[in-house]
Image: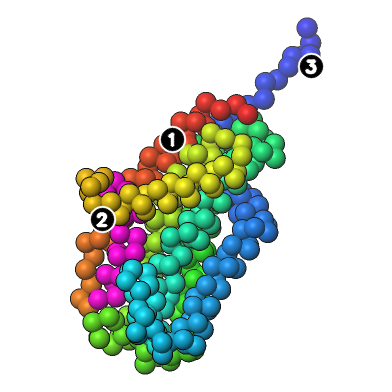
Amino acid sequence: MTAAAVAVPVSRTGHDTVPVTRLIAAELRWIFRRPRTLAVLGLLALVPIVIGIGLTLVGQNTGSNAPDDSGGALLVSAVNNAFVLPIAAMVMTLTLLLPLASAMAGADAIAGEAAHGTLRGWLIAPVSRGRLLAVKAFGVATVSVVAVLAMCVTGVATGLIINGTDSLFTLSGTTLSLGEALLRILLVGGWIVLQLWAVGAIALAVSSWTEHPMLVVASVLAANIVFTILGFLDSLKWLHPFLLTQNWTLAPASVLQDPMSLSMIGEGAVRALCYIVVGLSLAYGRLATRDG
């Protein structure tokens, strides 16, 4: 046997041979080219503008018909208040639209690609299952950040244009500087992003078990509604600390007071982190054994 006939084995550098930056860039391009993703993000960016214009047009009539719920009370407080407007808009959409954006991103990340037959390419590629899940989770997290950031920007801009910089005051009557108001708005935005990451983690877990994206969206939104209903039942108070949606409307409102009370903010953050760990663990457990 000659030396030329001897097959030279191809050396492998390990299972993760694709740079993670390349994977993330490809995932983000794929996400932000989806028309439905852009449509939802655009709709969320318009919500503070619509609310601001609506409150300006009917603001003189809100005092006598103020709603009793926390979200409605925030809307009433947002009249002529550029500080409360973006926070009220985010709280109102936290009940449905913002979780919808995260659920859609989580559904498209795994179930959507499985439905289109592209997930199998990921599974047989030189990419570990842990890295695959990390890239998908990063994409879902990015959608949540962009959605909340878009609402913050349009909310602050709308409030300042309509009411001016002298309308930045807390519910306690304390006037804030523009910098202080922006820091509090970003604090609420960051907290809401964390809640959306928890929703996205659960969506990824459900998405890893099905090839039907709409089933993922329906399941996550149904769970959101059930959690909200359970939160209203006083007979189930023992269960309330475990519900992700607990204090979703009350915790952001605590930032509007002076001085701020961060107890509910901290409690909600810890709860969201637990959901993130559980959701990503379930998703990884399924992806680690999935072959198609």
Q: Earlier in the sequence, mark 3 or mark 2?
A: 3
Instruction: State the image coordinates of residue 89 (x, y, percent, origin top left).
Output: 44, 72
Between disc 1 and disc 3, whose residue precedes? 3
Dot 3 alpha-carbon crowd within 10 angstroms: few under 14, some 14 to 19, many 20 or more = few
Q: Residue at x 37, y 42 (%)?
A: 277
Dividing the picture into quadrants, the one containing residue 74 is bottom left
The vertical placement of 158 against 115, above or below, is below
Amino acid carrying mark 3 in the image: Ala
Quick check: 178 left or right of 12?
A: left
Single out the mark in the foreground, 1 or 3.
Answer: 1
Magenta span has 30? no
Query: Which residue position is annotated with label 1?
Result: 282
Q: Residue at x 33, y 68 (%)?
A: 69
The residue identified by callout 3 is: 4
Mark 2 packing: few (<14 Cα in 10 Å), some, or many (20+)?
some
Residue 235's x, y, as percent?
A: 23, 47
Q: Secondary structure at mark 3?
A: helix
Kindly identify which residue carries mark 2: 267
* The magenta segment: 240-257
Residue type at numbered disc 1: Leu
Vertical side of 79 occupied by 36: above or below? above
Residue in the foreground of this view, choosing between 43 and 204: 43
Residue type pointed to by label 2: Glu
Q: Could you say which disc has been placed on residue 274 in the image?
A: none
**How far apart are labels 1 and 3 at the CA level?**
50 Å
Q: Nearer the viewer, residue 179 or 81?
A: 81
Judging depth in this view, the residue of 67 and 167 nearest the camera is: 67
